[in-house]
Image (tube, coloured by chain):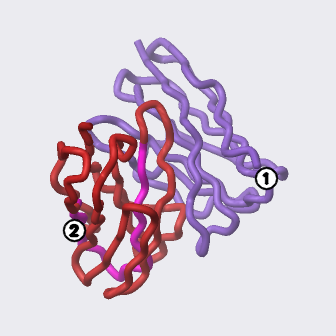
Chain colours: A purple, B red
Amino acid sequence: KAGVTQTPRYLIKTRGQQVTLSCSPISGHRSVSWYQQTPGQGLQFLFEYFSETQRNKGNFPGRFSGRQFSNSRSEMNVSTLELGDSALYLCASSLEPDNSPLHFGNGTRLTVT
Amino acid sequence: EDQVTQSPEALRLQEGESSSLNCSYTVSGLRGLFWYRQDPGKGPEFLFTLYSAGEEKEKERLKATLTKKESFLHITAPKPEDSATYLCAVQAGYGGSQGNLIFGKGTKLSVKP
């Protein structure tokens, strides 16, 4: 069974640009969550989607947004990139939001210059 | 404020030298505590879920335990392949789902042959 797939694996962008990251969950998983991982802050929750609806949102500015499609695939977008947005962005999927563990992809490494 | 603190930050062991990693938490209504393992360049890999004080889970050389204030990950006779960063996370009770976890910053374990 294929795991969570995130594309691209690496991305280099310039300050002020915007970026879209993609996540394909494990087949049959309907819940998708996004996390930002940095050396200083560790893993921080961005948002959670289930059945195309955002269930929870973390404490990030409005420049960070996401969506989920009817096939459970998800995208996140960051507009007006800042240097501090450089991080590993991890997507995780689960069967249901409340009673099954998260399975993570290997992330997208975003570098903002 | 909900918080997860892991100690030590780093731990170096000789192969076969057993030890424990600590995860202390303050959360309003714990609904679940999770342990993950993360290898360099990869996303976190799910290990265990614990739901109530006194609960224990085992997998190979790893055993996770839970009290009302902390969790321990015991590693018995570790091998070099157990080297990784071990992450602890909690699901809060006020509306947190398993997609919205609060992570500690991890313990980086190195096991030397």
Residue at 62% in and 68% down: A97
Image mark for residue A27 = 1
Whether A2 is drawn above or below A86: the answer is: below
Relative to A96, is B19 on the left or the right?
Answer: left
Residue situated in front as seen by the camera: B61 or B35: B61
Callout 1: chain: A
Give the residue at mark 2: B24
Residue situated in front as seen by the camera: B9 or A16: B9
Residue at 63% in and 24% down: A8
State which region is magenta: B21-38
What is the chief secondary structure element of the magenta stretch? strand
Q: Is residue B33 magenta?
A: yes
- Amino acid carrying label 2: it is Ser
Looking at the rendered structure, the number of numbered marks drawn on it comes to: 2
Query: Could you say where residue B67 lies in the image, as x and y percent from the top left?
Result: 26, 82
Q: Quadrant of residue A22?
A: top right
Q: Is residue B8 visible?
A: yes
Whether B64 is drawn above or below A1: the answer is: below
